[in-house]
Image (cartoon, helix red, strand yellow):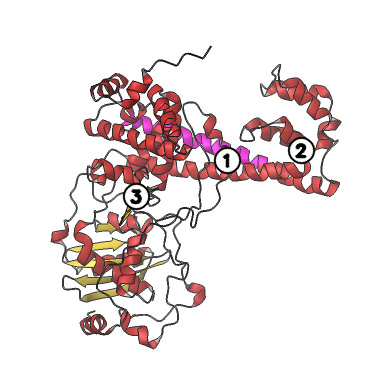
Amino acid sequence: MRRTESAVRFMSMAPDTISTVIHQGPRRAGRNSSPQVPVNNRAVREKNSCEKPLRRDYNGSGRIAPDGSRSYGPQLAKLNRSEPARLSAPALKSERTIAREAPSIRLTEGSAAVCGKPKGTPMMEFKELKHFAGFDWAKDHHCVVVVDQAGEIVSEFEFKHSAQGWKEFSERAAKLPGLGVAIETSSGPAVDQLLRRDFTVFPVNPAASQSYRQRKASSGTKSDHHDAWALADALRTDGRGWKVLNPADPLSVQLRLLCKDEVALIEQRTQMVNQLQQALAEYYPAALEAFEDWTLDFTWDFIIEFPTPEKLARVKEHRWRKFLHTHHLWRPGTAEKRLEIFARATEFQGSSAVVEAKSKLAVSLCKVLRTLEQQLKEYRQQIEELFKNHPDHELFGSLPGAGKVLAPRLLAAIGTDLQRYGNELSVLQAFAGTAPISYQSGKIHKARMRWACDKFMRYAVHLWAECFWKYSPWGKVYYRKKRQEGKSHACALRCLAQRLLKILFRMILDKKPYDAELHARNQEKHGSWVLSLLNKPAPTPCE
């Protein structure tokens, strides 16, 4: 269906249409972020790994700014000319979709972007495109607007996210040769379906998408059709420099999904451990005093076996000793102290009503944690098996400080396809969030932290730097030097991660594992200040 006349009238008469791109500036740190979970994670204690709770609901850069509906709202008559004509009636309010259907929208390869063309098959180049589609996706339906090379709307329609709906989309798209699709995400079911049908997909960062939408309507009007039309026209005018989304091999995608899901389960475990500690603080303070780390399974067994202080006091002392011996907790320095705490457990506790209620919650949480821990072990086993079968496992397995936990996660987050980063180290560092953002205006010139990045990659690289500086002698010297310069712990780790990514980039480029001797020779060849500090003799103590 052609709407040439309406599009021409819109471009010439709409008062809130502007011809320049409005670039969105960097967002402030912590603008929409949720508080960090305040508990240690058990993965910290795993050998050669440094795991910590990750912020699950972080809404920093990479999110859609408006919090309203993605469907149609009340339309004013004077704004009808500022967007393409709609083909369907406005949806009821109860049927509208929220603007944040996806928990994570970012310009990096993510959830289910698999199974497109075989790896190595070239995608369609931009100069071959003759039609440009804007794809505004939602949970249950999608809106598509297609423009030609002149910017005229040649097709606009909606279809349901179902087998019949995608069949209808494929039939309509088959009539439009040289079709490229711009979509405001790089992962998810919609992207998966597009790649499986061999479409040339251009992922758009949500911050850039919002700017394109404002370029078309600076008044702030928003609808599914307007968003799709803005993406389609942006692809036509600015898409020459955009990167095509190339599907990864199934093994790498499966490894990435398993690692991300493992992190999500670890976050759930952390949340439940916090709930358990809060419940124990209300009715069972002796248990918190006896055990420090409640991410360990023997603490859950203790609550299941002795759910209340009264139950702990009723049993004889040999039951306490048996529990400590059974769980290998009998130590000369801690066993007697714990027995003394058990003996006075009833001296300070909650009221009877609180004990009855909270003990039920504590036991329930311990049983769920038991099950969750078993599932995490199965995840870890499958991740290690996939990592072992990956052709690049030796390369990432040689990374010092990564260990068996972080090595698969780094492979899943970074990958070995440098074309994804344009074969540029700076792009990789920007994806990982280690490269700062430069801000210059007049005499003001400063750098600040980069928030728009691949969050999963950032966490993996941050944990790797945390483990590396404790493992490597020169990493420890580098970290301490940055701390002496007045940098915070997180900033010093980002500086170290920036340097580690440079090493990893060269390893991937040469397809060679990490060689500590080669790195030491390179440091000596280039006169590294790290090596000079490493070889500097320790100062003699003052007499």
Occupied quadrant, residue 464 = top left
Tell me where residue 7 appears, x and y as whole percent.
Answer: 24, 80
Pointer 1 or 3: first along the chain: 1
Which label sits on residue 372?
1
Kindly report which numbered mark, 2 or 1, lies closer to the viewer in this rendering.
2
Horizontal side, residue 46 vs residue 290: left or right: left
User: Farthest residue toward the left?
Assistant: 127
Magenta stretch, main secondary structure class: helix
Please provide the residue range marked out in magenta.
366-393
Tell me where residue 300 appears, x and y as whole percent.
Answer: 67, 35
Residue holding disc 2? 285
Can residue 293 be seen from the camera position used here? yes
**Of 542 and 76, the residue lying toward us:** 542
Residue that appears at 27% across and 52% down? 245
Q: Amino acid at mark 1?
A: Leu
Pointer 2 or 1: first along the chain: 2
Q: Amino acid at mark 2?
A: Pro
**Of 402 and 254, the residue lying toward us:** 402
Inter-mark Cα distance, 2 to 3: 47 Å
Which label sits on residue 437?
3
